[in-house]
Amino acid sequence: MDAALTHWINAAAGISPFLDNAMVGISQIGVPLMVLAVVLQWWAKADRYHVRHAAISAGLAFLLGLAVNQFILLFVHRVRPYDAGVTHLLIAPSADWSFPSDHATATIAIVAAFAMQGLPRRTTALLVMAFLVCWSRIYIGTHYLTDVVGGAITGILGAIIVRLAYRENSRLDKLVTKIL
């Protein structure tokens, strides 16, 4: 089922140069754009310190989620879908294993961190961006659907751990959110 859904999402790859270029572009710059969007939250006018706390939480969740992925990669060695003949690859092949998707981890960690801080408008905007990045990774042929789901889970796990460990209005939080 995973291979079939992955193949279905990737089926349009190579047909429309416009769509292919858009998906490759989203895949390449989506994560940096989301990081930039989080960084720009530092200068938010409304509820400044709460939004800053969310931005710091998002960064920590991002990093923690990627660290969890590195641990998983020590034990899980899943072949990329293009190597298994499931997808048509639109970018250069990757040298690492397929599961979990770092792009999904990074983007969903950001979304989850903002969601856990009760910032619905920002969460929705970031979720749209994250969905496009995650979809693009399957569309361009570099990940299975379950690689993206696995990455999303590690991103959410990172956000949950950060939420539990990094408390708003703690001494450290007050120190950090008052910078600039």
Image (spheres, rainbow, N blue to C red):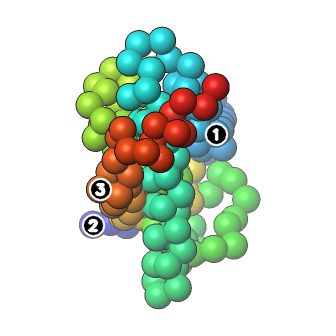
- Of the two numbered discs 3 and 2 on the same chain, state the one appearing first in sequence: 2
| Residue that appears at 69% across and 73% down | 95
| Residue that appears at 34% across and 47% down | 167
Looking at the image, residue 127 lies above or below residue 160: above
- In which quadrant is the C terminus drawn? top right
| Residue that appears at 53% across and 57% down | 63
From the image, tell me which residue sits under label 1.
32
- The residue type indicated by label 2 comes to Met
The span from disc 2 to disc 1 (Cα, nearest Å) is 32 Å
Q: Residue 29: percent from the left, percent from the top?
A: 65, 38
Q: Secondary structure at mark 2?
A: loop
Looking at the image, residue 79 lies above or below residue 114: below
- Figure label count: 3
Q: Secondary structure at mark 3?
A: helix
- Hey, which quadrant is residue 112 in on the image? top left
From the image, tell me which residue sits under label 3.
164
Camera-near label (2 vs 1) is 1
As drawn, the residue found furthest toward the bottom would be 75
From the image, tell me which residue sits under label 2.
1
The span from disc 3 to disc 2 (Cα, nearest Å) is 35 Å
Query: Is disc 3 surrounded by few (<14), some (14 to 19) or many (20+) residues within 10 Å?
Result: few
- The residue type indicated by label 1 comes to Pro
Q: Residue 108: percent from the left, percent from the top?
A: 40, 47
- The residue type indicated by label 3 comes to Leu
